Amino acid sequence: MSDRSKSSSLPSTHAGRRGDASANGNAALDPAVTWSQVGMTELILSQWRAEKPEIEGLGFEIGTLLTRLSILLNQFEVRTARGLGLRSGEIHLLYALRRVGPPYAQRPTDLFRLLGVTSGAITYTVNLLKGQALIEGLSDPQDGRSQMVRLTPAGLALIDALVAETAGLLDTALRPLAVTEQTAIRQGLARLAECLEAFTDHRVDSLRSEIEDKVV
C-alpha cells in the first residue's frame, strides 16, 4: 500500500482547515499515527498542521518540505563523501569551484554569496581543503592585492567522481517519477529559488562588505 493510500484511510483532525484541505489530503493526521505508517515527511507536516492550525498560507509547509529535503539530500552527500574525509561544507565549496569551469577559481566574496555562510566559515573550509591539496590560492588577475581559490588537479578529479556518483544515486532514487514530473519539479524549484533569492538578496548585499578577498 502506498503512503498516499495509507494516509487517506487514517482519521484526521482540523479537517476544515485551509478550505479544501481534506479534499487535497492535507488535513492533520491522528496523533497516534506513526512515521512507519505514512512516512516521516507526511508525519512532520501533519504534526505542524495539528499544532499550528491557524497558519493559512502554504509558505511554512513549503519551507518545512525544503528543510526535510535538505536533510535527505545531505544523506546522499554523506554517502558519496564517505571514506574521503570530507564534510558537507567542503563538498559545497568544491562544487562551487567546479561548476564555473576552467580555471575553476572563485573569489571568497563569490563563495560567500553562493554558499550563504560567514566569512569565517569560508576561511576555515578553504584552509581545510588547502591542507588536503584539493584547492590552492592564487592572485586575482584583475586585482593583484586580492586572492582567489582554485581547484587543484586532485580536487578536480575528486569532485568529478563525487558528482558522477551523486547524480547516479539521485537518478535511481527518482525513478518512480515520470520525466514530466521531474521536469515540473525542477521548474517549480527553480521558480521558488528565484522568489527566495529576490527576497533575501538585499540582506546578503549588506553583509558582503564584511568579507575581504585577501583573507585566504
Image (cartoon, rainbow, N blue to C red):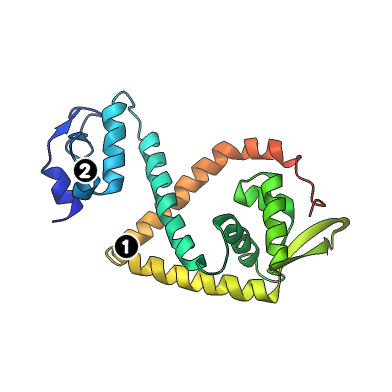
Label placed on residue 210: none
How many numbered discs sit on the rendered protein?
2
How busy is the neighbourhood of tag 1: few (under 14 within 10 Å), some, or many (20 plus)?
Answer: few
Farthest-out residue, right: 145
Label 2 element class:
loop
Horizontal and vertical percent position of residue 210: 75, 40
Residue in the foreground of this view, choosing between 178 and 64: 64
Label 2 to label 1: alpha-carbon separation: 32 Å
As drawn, 168 above or below 18: below
Residue in the foreground of this view, choosing between 133 and 12: 133
Horizontal and vertical percent position of residue 148: 77, 60
Q: Quadrant of residue 167?
A: bottom left
Of tags 2 and 1, which is closer to the observer?
A: 2
Label 1 element class:
helix
As drawn, 155 above or below 125: below
Horizontal and vertical percent position of residue 3: 19, 51
* 103 left or right of 215 in image: left
The residue drawn where x is 70% and y is 52% is 124
* 168 left or right of 205 in image: left
Q: Quadrant of residue 138?
A: bottom right
Label placed on residue 180: 1
Q: Where does the C terminus fall, quadrant-wise?
A: bottom right
* Amino acid on which disc 2 is placed: Thr
The residue drawn where x is 39% and y is 65% is 170
Q: Where does the N terminus fall, quadrant-wise?
A: bottom left
As drawn, 67 above or below 27: below
The residue drawn where x is 68% and y is 67% is 132
* 166 left or right of 8 in image: right
Which one is earlier in the sequence, the residue at label 2 or at label 1?
A: 2
Which residue position is annotated with label 2? 34
* Amino acid on which disc 1 is placed: Thr
